[in-house]
Amino acid sequence: MDVSHILDSLNARQREAVSAENAPLLIQAGAGSGKTRVLTHRIAWLNQVVGLSPFGILAVTFTNKAAGEMRARVEELLGMSVASMWVGTFHGLSHRFLRMHWKEAGLPQGFQILDSEDQKRMVQRSIRGLGLDESHWPPRTAMWYINAKKDDGLRADHIRDEGDPTEQQMIEIYKAYETACNLAGAVDFAELLLRTLETLRNNEALLQHYRQRFQHILVDEFQDTNAIQYAWLRLLAGDSGYVFAVGDDDQSIYGWRGARVENILNFSDHFPDTKTIRLEQNYRSTSTILNAANALIENNSNRLGKNLWTDIGEGELITFYSAYNEGDEAKFVVERVMEHVAGGGQRAECAILYRSNAQSRVLEEELFRHAVPYRVYGGMRFFERMEIKDALAYMRLLSLPEDDISFERVVNQPPRGIGDKTISQIRNVAREAGVSLWHACAEILSANALKGRAATAVGNFMKLIIKLRADTKDLALDKLVEQTIKDTGLLEHYQKDRSEKGEARVENLQELIGAAGMPVETPQDTPDISELDAFLANAALEAGEQQGNEFDDCVQLMTMHSAKGLEFPLVFITGMEQGLFPSQRSIEESGIEEERRLCYVGITRAQQKLTLSMAEHRRLYGRDHFNTTSKFISEIPAELMMEIRPRLNVSRPMPSPVRRQSIREDNTTGLSVGQRVMHAKFGEGTVTDYEGQGAHARVYVNFEEAGPKWLVMAYAKLEIMNVA
DNA sequence: GAACTAATGATTTTT
DNA sequence: TCATTAGTTC
């Protein structure tokens, strides 16, 4: 059989990995060394050469995006659909397993998934239920504790009581939380994994079935696996399965959320006869960039060790700029971006990276000032929005009225006269009887324990849900959403809010109808899960895209963490300051090796040109910081770097208006200086300046109430006022 | 029930 | 510094 299409495009190491004999394989894939390519080609190899059915392959990743890409690339390579192959995230695959084996797992058939926000509310409820003071026992902390334990595979009963009163209390909260989740048929993210693991462990027949089925297990980003994910892999692989693990210990940047680099370092101890293959040829960056990255990471101990190389050529030197303050730094970066664009480059080729999200603000302001379109990664995702979660909560109640989190969320949203007093009464009954809030309501009503108005309100709410469920039983999903947001009054409620925010919420709700109209991909082996439950699970597991931008060609702003896996011709790493990057906390406690790996990740995102910058003086969280240069700068060989000295006038806080007016451009705003205008939010004002062209045209308006502001014509919806 | 006020907390993020 | 959120008031 001709296998050239699988191997031809690969280098020697990649071929070795793809065509390796059956054995545990550890592929140390450096940044930009083609790891996704190796993974997908390995799957193709297993299928077309070894003759393994897609049915026998399990491929697991961390993000939905990575899973989607992998499936698409395999299908492209094989020229066929591989729906029977299990490709997905640890959570997604566990979810699939639990839907199929809910009985064995001891879950209700319609179990719901809690996202982090739901989980926090649930923990909060448990804390309140125990009569504890929330300020002393913050839900965040308790949630963090519970997740850390679950990620280590520990139930509340498993935790050894060392006599520490704080820990004892945490264990109590954990227990109460477990009870509440079981009652509500709710499963949090960590629970998906833990429950799957336990179900397999306690059910020999199931375990044997899956071990036999999945002879080959492929793992992406192996350095990011935590204890339970590793246990999951080992259990499934058993003694007869082959794990093909691809990862890079130098890119392990999620230790703080439980990832264990040891999983990579000790892989060969756990899987006998492991074959290790290193992919060190980099297809992304210039040798200057790679040499900088190599030199930097050399400073870490405890590595498996590897050296990236390329035949792309030296390319440009790395630029380093030490700015006077963060404003100056932003100005410098944006100027470089604008130069690139002026030279015919795309904005989307530029990525501005930073350590913490708080740093994006100044950069955004500077980009906005110059009307450079940009996109910030890491905002609120679609299915996390308040109005969307409200609608979903109603839908969840339709599916499973015992879902207490959803019940509490919408029982008085929109307001229908069920106040705190009534709710806490319901809660008490529920707690005493050990039933869900929904059942508690029914009991209270039949016992006539509520007074007039409250009783009617609660009764009406229950009737609403029951009627809605009956009415929508046979409806298509999008119609169901539509009817839900109408009949519950949710849509009307948000329509009353005439502000921009309210309008956006109404739009989002309408978009939800649209989203429900799209078919949700249900795996063929997932049995009788309703269309509604599939949609709800999907919403929790895949929170959707972050908000896009109306401009396609945007400068990309993101943290170095979110940049992992991406690449850009031009990369700017800002805030190269001791105490910020590496962060103060990492210097003091967690050790800075992970910070250095993060820096390594940042550097290796760059294809052609890397620019580093710092601010000697930075205001962060209302405090002034006087910074020294990041240690990491000194770890990059000086001959790879060129330092740019600040110009004399850069530290001036604001450009003088005189200067702006001296370089006049055509006025395309349609308004003239001196024109009186009206803005929906800021009120009346006078136009005093303008700049920019076309879609980016802006005017400077001095508002009576709100003060002077720059407004983009395309968005501001200014009303021209006639002089009285 | 909306509208104001005070308190809080703040690396990094996915599921 | 500043955004979110919980609490308070009318």
Image (cartoon, coloured by chain):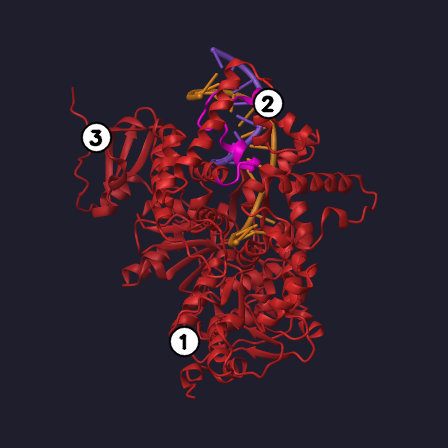
Chain colours: A red, B orange, C purple
Q: CA–CA distance between discs 2 and 1?
A: 60 Å
Residue depth check, mark 2 versus mark 3: number of the one nearer the observer: 2
- Report the amino acid beneath label 3: Glu
Q: CA distance from mark 2 to mark 3?
A: 56 Å
Residue at horizontal 53%, vertical 42%?
A: A620
Rendered residue at 67%/46% (across/down): A146
N-term mark: 1 or 3 = 1
Residue, far bottom: A1
Q: Residues within 10 Å of mark 1 (few under 14, many from 20)?
A: some
Give the letter of the chain under mark 2. A
Disc number for residue A78 = 1
Which residue corresponds to the image point at 67% horizontal and 63% vertical from the top-left? Answer: A231
| Residue assigned mark 2 | A444
Q: Is residue A339 visible?
A: yes
**Which range of residues does the magenta coloring cover?**
A399-425
- Label 3: state its secondary structure: strand
Q: Secondary structure at mark 2?
A: helix
